[in-house]
């Protein structure tokens, strides 16, 4: 079957070829047409576009993500839908002004698999061709044999574009972690990926002091953002809070302590919610509330489990940080299977 032609309307009209079964978002990003996107799983609603003409199918979508009125008006989620004919698609205002690194397939060889905390690995992969990405973005890894996709944020800054670092937390009985990465993945193994994805990215135009709030392996994109920000300005004021439950879940302590010695504006605060005796006791949002009377003039980047991110956002707002300065990414469980497609 041949590709369908998708006309993208808006301030910068373009024509994009979309292969049978290819998702709109994938086709757009590969063609250099940037669309806001975050989860690539149909759960955040960031990638909605309007079908003006033609046939586009997508799986049943929760009305909390795409309202019934919007669906009746022809809106679809670009990350979930595929055209079955030529189509005209209206993209939202703001499309085209994102990170703008073309999506592509990547292949790489595992350089190192290192245990860094309880049930947590650091995975380093050398890739065949350097990847252009923005600090904070992620890639998707294909689980060999079964084709499932898992998402991991880069922890390295964009300057080390040919060696990607990921933090991987074991999911009990998880097909990607328990049964592959933690079980058999080793140095020299080849892995297939695609990326970069996401618009949780370091805003390099803003020079406000930064608050970084991480929960568990949500540290990865913030490590990339902090390293990138310090490469651009070694004096940058950055306050990193890393929250985990127990001391044995904490990792990268030495890395951050060494970095704080080199960068006087960097503060590193590990937070343990269930243990005492190291760093601070409590949740990251509560520790930030205790540390700051006001966060006016700051910007924040938060990444981790949804409850941690929501509490952290609330804390920033209580300390009067404007909503437009708050960037967030929630780590949500990957779907276990692909949903059925229906016409939109
Ligand atoms: S719903 Fe498409 S990127 Fe989240």
Image (spheres, rainbow, N blue to C red):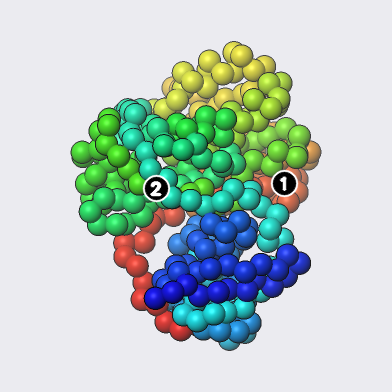
Nearer the observer, 105 or 337: 105
Left or right side of 245 for 147:
left
Left or right side of 236 for 305:
left
Quadrant position of the N terminus in the picture: bottom left
Q: Position of residue 132 (x, y in %)?
A: 56, 41
Tag count in the figure? 2
Q: Position of residue 263 (x, y in %)?
A: 64, 17
Residue 217, picture quadrant: top left
Q: Residue furthest right?
A: 297
What residue do we see at 51% from left, 40% from top? 131
What residue do we see at 75% from left, 49% from top? 322
Q: Position of residue 76 (x, y in %)?
A: 55, 75
Residue bearing mark 1:
325
- Secondary structure beneath disc 1? helix
Q: Which mark is residue 316?
A: none
Left or right side of 130 for 210:
right
Residues at marks 1 and 2, CA–CA distance in whole angstroms: 31 Å
Above or below for 194 versus 23: above
Mark 1 vs ligand 1: CB below 8 Å: no
Q: Position of residue 27 (x, y in %)?
A: 52, 63
- Secondary structure beneath disc 2? strand
Nearer the observer, 234 or 31: 31
Sequence-first disc among 1 and 2: 2
What residue do we see at 72% from left, 46% from top? 325
What residue do we see at 23% from left, 53% from top? 145
Mark 2 vs ligand 1: CB below 8 Å: no
CB-based contact (under 8 Å), mark 1 and mark 2? no
Residue 261, picture quadrant: top right
Residue 109, picture quadrant: top left
Residue bearing mark 2:
193
The answer to whether residue 11 is seen in the rendering is yes
Label 1 vs label 2, nearer the camera:
2
């Amino acid at each position: 079957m041949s590709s369908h032609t998708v006309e993208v309307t808006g301030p910068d009209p373009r024509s994009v070829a979309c292969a049978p079964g290819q998702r709109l978002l994938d086709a757009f990003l590969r063609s250099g047409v940037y669309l806001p996107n975050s989860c690539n799983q149909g759960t955040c609603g960031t990638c909605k576009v309007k079908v003006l003409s033609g046939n586009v199918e997508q799986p049943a979508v929760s009305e909390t993500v795409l309202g019934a009125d919007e669906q009746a008006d022809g809106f679809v989620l670009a990350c979930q839908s595929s055209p079955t004919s030529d189509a005209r698609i209206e993209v939202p205002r703001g499309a085209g002004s994102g990170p703008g690194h073309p999506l592509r397939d990547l292949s790489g060889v595992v350089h190192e698999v290192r245990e860094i905390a309880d049930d947590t690995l650091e995975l380093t992969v050398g890739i065949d061709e350097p990847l252009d990405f923005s600090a904070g973005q992620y890639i998707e890894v294909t689980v060999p044999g079964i084709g499932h996709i898992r998402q991991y944020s880069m922890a390295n800054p964009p300057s080390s574009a040919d060696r990607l670092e990921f933090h991987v937390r074991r999911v009990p009985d998880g097909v990607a972690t328990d049964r592959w990465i933690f079980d058999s993945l080793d140095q020299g193994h080849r892995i297939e990926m695609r990326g970069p994805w996401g618009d949780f990215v370091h805003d390099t135009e803003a020079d406000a002091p930064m608050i970084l709030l991480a929960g568990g392996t949500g540290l990865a994109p913030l490590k990339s953002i902090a390293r990138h920000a310090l490469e651009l300005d070694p004096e940058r004021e950055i306050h990193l809070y890393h929250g985990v439950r127990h001391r044995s879940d904490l990792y990268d302590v030495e890395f951050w302590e060494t970095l704080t010695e080199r960068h006087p504006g960097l503060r590193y605060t590990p937070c343990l919610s269930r243990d005492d005796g190291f760093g601070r006791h409590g949740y990251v949002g509560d520790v930030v509330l205790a540390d700051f009377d006001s966060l006016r003039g700051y910007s924040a980047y938060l990444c981790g489990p949804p409850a941690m991110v929501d509490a952290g956002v609330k804390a920033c707002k209580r300390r009067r940080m404007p909503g437009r300065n708050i960037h967030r990414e929630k780590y949500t469980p990957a779907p276990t299977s692909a949903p059925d497609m229906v016409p939109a």
